[in-house]
Amino acid sequence: MSSTYDVIIIGAGAAGLMCASTAGYRGRSVLVLDHTNKPGKKILMSGGGRCNFTNLNSTPANFLSDNPNFCISALKRYTPQDFLELVDRHGIEHEEKAAGQFFCKNSAKDILNLLLTECGWAGVNLKMKTNIESVMSQGNGYHLKTSSGSFQCESLVIASGGLSIPTMGSSSFGYDIAKQFGVNVLPTSAALVPFTLPLQLKERLAPMAGVSCSVEVNCNGAVFREPMLITHRGLSGPAMLQISSFWHPGDAIHINLLPGVSVGDCLHEYRRTKPQSYTHHFLEDFLPKRFARAFSELQQWIKPFQFCHNEDLKAIADVLSQWEVHPAGTEGYKTAEVTLGGVDTRDLSSKTMSARNQPGLFFIGEVLDVTGHLGGHNFQWAWASGVAAGQHV
Ligand code: FDA
């Protein structure tokens, strides 16, 4: 005997729960299945426990995809303001931390409770600790064998997310289902992830671990001005996470340690006014003291300015404004916030999120090849793609 629903959604994360309530409010009978013990685990750990749930400045330009126009339609139909209104309707206290980035004032739990409340009101059924053993197309729908029994549905939504943080329930399920039903899957890689460094550089940066400074980083044409954090493992902080989405193994990244400063002019002025001082003294005017000293040692800037020729000053200015770093790699899916690549959106309808070749099969959220910048864009994509599918399942 199998239980029958109009819609089954695999994955009780941000996209799956949003899709579930949207479909439930349309009068569809909805079952959400998930193999972990609790829904929305990534929501709870997001934004340092306070969930950066949207970004008011989110536009399609904040997303990476092989098919960049795909996300436009869904993002237009469900906007950051729409989600903010929902948050306000639930009386959740929030704050804008950086321009456009909205966080919960208290806890990310508020966002999960919102989604679960909406699902409750919409009559959604939720079954956790359920392993999906097989999915077959059957008649006009799908038949699922699971550890909680067999189920049938007309519409099947894959909202199983990407590969980041395997301990939170991530799996390749969505990609496997796509391949099973002839939907193309693009290569994946860890994104919004810290860099690891070659051993020698890592050891030499170790005295600076814990230091954070605002930098401008560029790689492959992308530029971000945000804080960088030096860790015992390598380079992290928003600037590094952002640029990691554009980095390929073997690439160098270039870091301007003094963005907005006319470094050459300032160095000449320093030599004129403080000839007996050293580069680390100059750097201390702009950067944390510990960083200024350790970085000067790393670069072997050991002469006082009075003994520096113009070409020495130029060499110092070049390093400060274009410090070239060759990361050894990234920390990978273990700590990445998202997965780049995934289900090829060329095989889907941008209006409904359904597979073109497979009626009734939908993909939403992070499992798709749509990856946002840091700053609330990834949740906005989860909400928008979830609503787009929820209106058509
Ligand atoms: P999500 O991963 O949330 O959910 C997928 C669900 O599917 C999970 O519940 C999983 O258990 C289930 N599942 C997987 N395989 C399955 C299987 N085989 N069978 C059954 N169920 C299965 N974004 C943002 O905008 N602002 C932020 O502040 C942050 N912060 C942040 C911090 C950290 C540490 C991480 C790791 C990520 C973020 N993100 C973020 C990214 C954001 O969390 C992510 O983009 C969304 O959670 C994606 O939502 P989905 O619903 O697509 O997948």
Image (cartoon, helix red, strand yellow):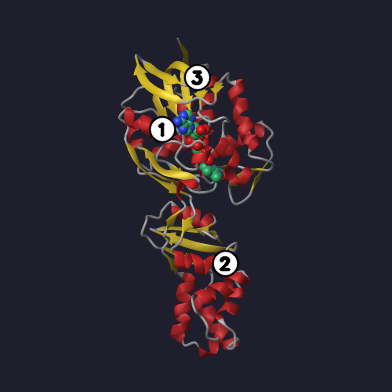
Number of other residues with Cα within 10 Å of mark 1, as a class: few under 14, some 14 to 19, many 20 or more: many
Q: Is residue 87 above or below residue 232?
A: above
Residue 204 left/right relative to 358: right
Earlier-in-chain disc, 1 versus 2: 1
Expressed as whole percent of the image width and height from the top left, the position of residue 328 reads 41, 59
Residue 29: numbered disc: none
Amino acid type, mark 1: Gly
- Residue 259 in view in this figure: no
Cα–Cα span, label 3 and label 2:
51 Å
Number of other residues with Cα within 10 Å of mark 3, as a class: few under 14, some 14 to 19, many 20 or more: some
Residue position marked by numbered label 2 in the rendering: 208
- For discs 3 and 2, the disc positioned in front in the rendered view: 3
Earlier-in-chain disc, 1 versus 3: 3
Residue position marked by numbered label 3 in the rendering: 148
Marks 3 & 2, CB-CB < 8 Å contact: no
Marks 1 & 2, CB-CB < 8 Å contact: no
Nearer to me, 177 or 130: 130
Expressed as whole percent of the image width and height from the top left, the position of residue 227 reads 56, 59
Residue position marked by numbered label 1 in the rendering: 174
Cα–Cα span, label 1 and label 3:
19 Å
Badge 1 element: helix
Number of other residues with Cα within 10 Å of mark 2, as a class: few under 14, some 14 to 19, many 20 or more: many
- The residue positioned 41% from the left and 32% from the top of the image is 173
